[in-house]
Image (tube, rainbow, N blue to C red):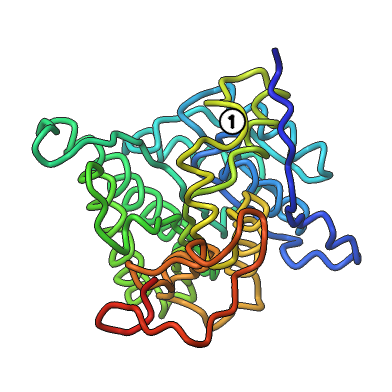
Amino acid sequence: MACSPDLGATTSTESAASGWLPLSGHTALVAGTGPGIGAGIALALARAGAAVACADVRPAHAEHCARDVVDAGAAAVAIAADLADEAGVEEALARAQSALGVVDVLINGVAVMDERSVLAMDYAGYLRQLRVILGSAFLLTRAVARQLVAVGRPGAIVHLASTAGHQGQADNIGYCTAKAGLLNFARSAAAELGPHGIRVNTLTPTTTDPRPGQARAARWGVAAGGCGLSPRQRTNERRLPLGRLPTPDDYGAAAVYLVSDAAAVVSGSDLRVDAGALASYWAWSAGDRRPEGGAPVADATSTTGGEHGTAG
């Protein structure tokens, strides 16, 4: 039975149908084009006028994403490649350049999940996560930057971080370590590449509403990873200050901003698109004061709290 999720309240970069295409004339390489975040960002770039190279280790993801980009009215190429492999990255960039021109926008979302604790995880699994997440970031950044420097063009690079990279999370040691490293990798690359006109930033997602990705996966005929919100996702949604999970469209709008001229002097920064997740003191949650499905309850008399006097 197909999963037909209720997408709920979402935003859409398609609403920018004003005729203004801030990325017209640009070519983007989106590394990691699964039906959730990666495809959502690729479509946002396409709707903003960019040509998009859709690259993924899974050929079906690259191909379906590229078709969606073409359907959105932009040029696209599908590239199946291991983006944590040096030869794979060089080949992917060469194919993108041959099909669409010089890549001056990179969105890197390459990652692998392996939620295990420091006590349970084997060293090989730990190194694999570092290699995939940090290795791909290095290889992709180096390849795109070298190409841009060689032709004397500016560019913009965005790496997808995670709220797990900003704070510790039990039983997810490899992912948290790698995503934390990615934040400072991007800052270091920004400092080095700035004189060449190449901006490097990170975009931090959090627990994401899976329903748009599930609907896209069903249309693509690929594994969706569930149907609707899981109990854990519903709990996370309730505890977010804004009371809803971000969607791939939310990240897409942020990515378009970061690589556009609107962010011409933004480099070495992290844009958190997390519905306020990282703004909260750990012991307090808006959801603790929000009735199911309602707005937070006003309380001007609370005196119970932790050391900052606000924890509920």
Q: Residue at x 39, y 59 (%)?
A: 163
Q: Is residue 75 left or right of residue 92?
A: right
Percent coordinates x, y for residue 245 in the rendering: 58, 53
- Can you say whether 60 is above or below 243 in the image? above
Q: Is residue 103 left or right of residue 178?
A: right
Percent coordinates x, y for residue 88 in the rendering: 39, 33
Q: For the N terminus, which image quadrant?
A: top right
Q: Residue at x 43, y 73 (%)?
A: 279
SS at mark 1 in the image: helix
Q: Which picture quadrant has residue 57? A: top left
Q: Residue at x 74, y 27 (%)?
A: 4
Residue situated in front as seen by the camera: 222 or 138: 222
Number of marks present in the image shown: 1
Q: Residue at x 65, y 76 (%)?
A: 261
Crowding around mark 1 (Cα neighbors within 10 Å: few <14, some 14 to 19, many 20+) is many
Q: Is residue 228 left or right of residue 235?
A: right
Q: Which residue is mark 1?
A: 62
Percent coordinates x, y for residue 268 in the rendering: 40, 75
- Can you say whether 241 is above or below 30 in the image? below
Q: Is residue 206 left or right of residue 188?
A: right
- Can you say whether 56 is above or below 135 in the image? above
- Furthest toward the top, the residue is 1
Residue situated in front as seen by the camera: 153 or 106: 106
- Furthest toward the right, the residue is 18
Q: For the C terminus, which image quadrant?
A: bottom left
Residue situated in front as seen by the camera: 198 or 40: 40
Percent coordinates x, y for residue 142 in the rendering: 36, 55
- Can you say whether 204 is above or below 51 in the image? below
Q: Which amino acid lies under the numbered mark 1 shown in the image of this protein?
A: Ala
